[in-house]
Amino acid sequence: MTDISYPATSFRIVRDRLGEPAPDALAGAVVALGNFDGVHRGHRAVIAAAQARAHALGRPAAAMTFEPHPRAVFDPETPEFRLSSLDGKVRLLAATGLDGAIVMGFDKALASLSAADFVAKILVERYKVAGVAAGFDFQFGKNRAGTTEFLTKEGGRLGFTVDIAPPLLDAGERVSSGAVRSALTRGEVEHAWRLLGYPWFQSGIVVHGASRGRDLGYPTANIQLDPNCKLRHGVYAVRVGVDGRRYDGVANFGRRPMFDTGVVLLEAFLFDFKGDLYGKTLDVAFYAFLRPELKFRSTADLVDRMNEDSKTARQILAGAGNAFPQLADVGVLKQG
């Protein structure tokens, strides 16, 4: 168990939608543009560029992100494996030291704006940006016609600075949300950790289960993740944040072949924890894939393997130092 010190923050959150009155908060900021799913190392390079420019200009720095993910509007029939929920994304953004986040409601009205109108109506008229920062491949506006070259040209014409972050490579692989998703679908959480810059995590409220784990000597906290989560099913070494503390543990994500009810659950066993977790929100960070789900001949064999898994997880987590996602203590319902 480890105590957590969440950073104090004056982070401002603006929930905005085209057609509503323009908010006053964060006007005149330098804005980092992007969806920021996962807030990985590449995203952080864009954020750092915005912060450096904001410091030079004496302005606040903010992120502008879009909810729901544009793919949910353009292709609603294709499930989107999100690396972070809106709440998780905002907590990650706040922990970077940004002054705030603008959460733009993404709908057909916003999607229909031309690139020129997005710059003029959103960036200039609505937020009076002092500058923007974006990744090298950022596209915006109707039919994604807006490019970084166009953005730079418009910045020069309309009087705001533009900083473009180049691609970030890790061992020859471009750091991207897609690369992180691919790693997680293979169960390669250490690879995802390297790309993200922190152990990937998911948050959820503990729900009641069948209490089989308790009967086996392994009481678990059960969490239902987004049904579109494509993390490989199996057993993982995890670290869990709850009530301002962290606990090492082991977790199973999947259908539990010994007791399959058709429901996919994340079941986490917290080492050295005693108490009631029902109804609490847990942050579960993933450190190593231990094994795939297996169906054992007996519950005794299952318990033996759970003992082995726990021993292995303790060893792995002992070597992980204090690594844990930096998550600021803010909520998405707080309005700027």
Image (tube, rainbow, N blue to C red):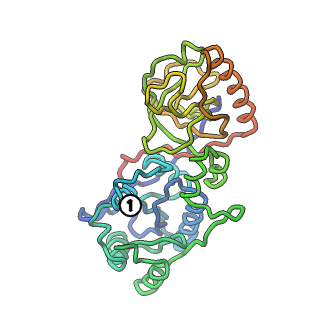
| Count of numbered marks | 1
Image location of residue 121, percent across then percent down:
31, 74
Q: Identity of the amino acid at label 1?
A: Pro
Q: Residue at x 34, y 62 (%)?
A: 74
Q: Residue at x 49, y 58 (%)?
A: 36
Q: Residues within 10 Å of mark 1 (few under 14, many from 20)?
A: some
Task: Decide: is 216 above or below 55.
Answer: above
Q: Residue at x 31, y 62 (%)?
A: 23
Q: Nearer the viewer, residue 241 or 5?
A: 241
Q: Nearer the viewer, residue 328 or 216?
A: 216
Q: Quadrant of the N terminus?
A: top right
299 lies left or right of 101? right
Q: Quadrant of the C terminus?
A: bottom left
Image location of residue 291, percent across then percent down:
66, 34
Determine the residue located farthest toward the bottom in the rendered image: 157
Task: Decide: is 197 above or below 221.
Answer: below
Q: Nearer the viewer, residue 195 or 261?
A: 261
Image location of residue 224, percent across then percent down:
44, 34
Determine the residue located farthest toward the front in the rendered image: 297
Image location of residue 34, percent across then percent down:
47, 64
Identify the image quadrant of residue 235. top right
Question: Which residue has dot 1 on it?
Answer: 70
Q: Residue at x 59, y 35 (%)?
A: 234
Task: Decide: is 124 above or below 158.
Answer: above
Secondary structure under badge 1? Answer: helix
